[in-house]
């Protein structure tokens, strides 16, 4: 038994004595996917908020490769705290991909760091720590003092506290200035209720020749009637964008209860640090082409111009988060100024708590048909009146039109049967 072990170990000893080192199978090959950047969503959070972490990974080989990434949080004492997030990504040859993670620190004020660990794609094997390790610091609540820098003896045993190194172009090379531009800008939905949340999607790309550093992103909205009065949505910071790199961004937004109703647009703006140059400042700002309509009551059905059949089903549907009781108003004038030219459903002092209603035949098409014939028009308008019983508030939706097909096709009379009114009176049997 001992002779067998010695025979097995002999080739290793001979290799070491001859200076060949350990055989290649003892060392682990470097993973083809490398982390190139880590960016935090916010440098400071309120207690209970989540931190968004973007990790950029590049495939350095000519074959597709997969990796598992895990983002954790540690406190100022180096202990892992809060929640963690992980995902597996696959990247095409020589491509680069950004992965987003959402982690939540403890609900207490302090200084924290988010850092990323690498695993095999199935998370069964931890990969060696990259040098330098990727991490980023942030604060929760009031900024707390950072832990003091390590002593010289500690620095040799601990991770460097400088974070990932910045890119520096080689001496003697002259790079064109960075140039920031917005792309693929979208705001949804186009019709927003007070109390709803909208979503902004956009991409910020550096089309210049140098790295864009310390980018400040400002997003705001404005009512189209008062375009100079802008309300901020969010401010974000981006550490760096390499030439040709783009950052996909998403932001949620909403309107306060007392916001002015009507049409809104969203404006994006990006600024470089004060000591940096932007090749073209005019393309750093972008205003959405689409309009977001803010209302307290959103009309759902019928759509504008919808045609009802006179003998068919009449249905009206709407949505609201501000009001609890409703009336549908039907009229033949779009301004609803003349009370004789429109009527309410339900009528009188009644209200409905539902957000849809089916009129009675006497209401539609009955009453509507009478107004249409009186005013000699084929177009009818509808809107919804909302009421909040708790706060004694009322509000109207926008106005939409619809039509009713009043053409009636009566079957031809049966020639074998005389009309009832032409039949002779029955004889008096008395």
Image: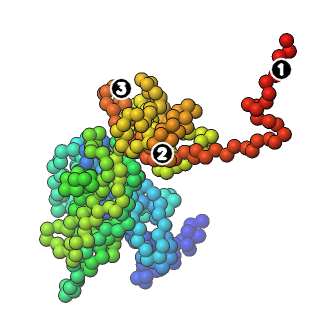
Instruction: Name the side, left or right, on which 358 lies relative to 21.
Output: right
Is 268 or 130 nearer to us in this picture?
Answer: 268
Residue 81, position as x, y percentages in the image: 33, 46
Distance, label 3 to label 1, CA atoms, is 66 Å
Q: Position of residue 206 (x, y in %)?
A: 29, 73
Which is more N-terminal, label 3 or label 2? 2
Quick check: 88 left or right of 280?
right
Neighbour class for label 1 at 10 Å: few (<14), some, many (≥20)? few
| Residue at the left extreme of this rendering | 275
The residue at 84%/40% (across/down) is 416
The percent position of residue 329, horizontal first and vertical second, equals 43, 36
Residue position for label 2: 376
Nearer the camera: disc 3 or disc 1: 1
Tell me which numbered mark, 3 or 1, is placed earlier along the sequence.
3
Q: Which residue is mark 3?
A: 389
Q: Is residue 155 above or below residue 34?
A: above
State which tag comes first along the sequence, 1 or 2: 2
Residue 102 seen: no
Question: What SS does tag 3 mark?
Answer: loop
């Amino acid at each position: 038994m001992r002779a067998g072990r010695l025979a097995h170990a002999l080739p290793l000893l001979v290799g070491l004595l001859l200076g060949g080192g350990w055989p290649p199978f003892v060392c682990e090959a470097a993973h083809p996917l490398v982390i190139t950047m880590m960016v935090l969503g916010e440098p400071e959070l309120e207690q209970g908020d989540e931190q968004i972490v973007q990790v950029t990974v590049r495939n350095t080989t000519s074959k597709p490769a997969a990796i598992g990434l895990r983002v954790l949080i540690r406190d100022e004492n180096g202990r892992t705290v809060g929640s963690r997030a992980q995902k597996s990504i696959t990247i095409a040859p020589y491509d680069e991909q950004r992965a987003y993670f959402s982690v939540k620190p403890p609900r207490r004020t302090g200084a924290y760091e988010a850092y990323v660990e690498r695993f095999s794609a199935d998370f069964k094997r931890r990969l060696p720590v990259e040098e330098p390790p990727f991490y980023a610091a942030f604060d929760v609540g009031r900024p707390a003092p950072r832990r003091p820098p390590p002593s010289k003896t500690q620095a040799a045993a601990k991770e460097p506290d400088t974070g990932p190194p910045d890119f520096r172009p080689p001496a003697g090379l002259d790079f064109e200035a960075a140039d920031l531009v917005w792309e693929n800008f979208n705001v949804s939905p186009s019709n927003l209720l007070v109390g709803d949340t909208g979503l902004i999607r956009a991409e910020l790309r550096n089309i210049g020749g140098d790295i864009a550093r310390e980018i400040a992103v400002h997003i705001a909205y404005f009512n189209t009637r008062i375009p100079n009065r802008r309300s901020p949505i969010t401010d974000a910071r981006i550490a760096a964008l390499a030439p040709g790199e783009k950052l996909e961004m998403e932001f949620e937004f909403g309107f306060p209860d007392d916001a002015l109703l009507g049409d809104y647009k969203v404006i994006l703006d990006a600024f470089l640090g004060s000591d940096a140059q932007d090749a073209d400042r005019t393309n750093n700002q972008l205003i959405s082409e689409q309009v977001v309509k803010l209302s307290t009551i959103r009309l759902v059905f019928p759509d504008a111009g919808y045609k009802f059949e006179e003998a068919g089903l009449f249905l009206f549907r709407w949505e609201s988060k501000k009001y609890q009781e409703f009336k549908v108003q039907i009229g033949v004038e779009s301004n609803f100024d003349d009370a004789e030219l429109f009527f309410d459903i339900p009528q009188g002092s009644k209200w409905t708590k539902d957000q849809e209603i089916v009129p009675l035949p006497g209401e539609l098409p009955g009453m509507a048909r009478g107004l249409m014939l009186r005013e000699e028009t084929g177009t009818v308008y509808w809107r919804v009146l909302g009421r909040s019983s708790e706060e004694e508030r009322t509000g109207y939706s926008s106005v939409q039109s619809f039509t009713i097909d009043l053409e009636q096709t009566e079957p031809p009379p049966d020639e074998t049967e005389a009309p009832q009114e032409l039949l002779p009176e029955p004889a008096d049997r008395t």
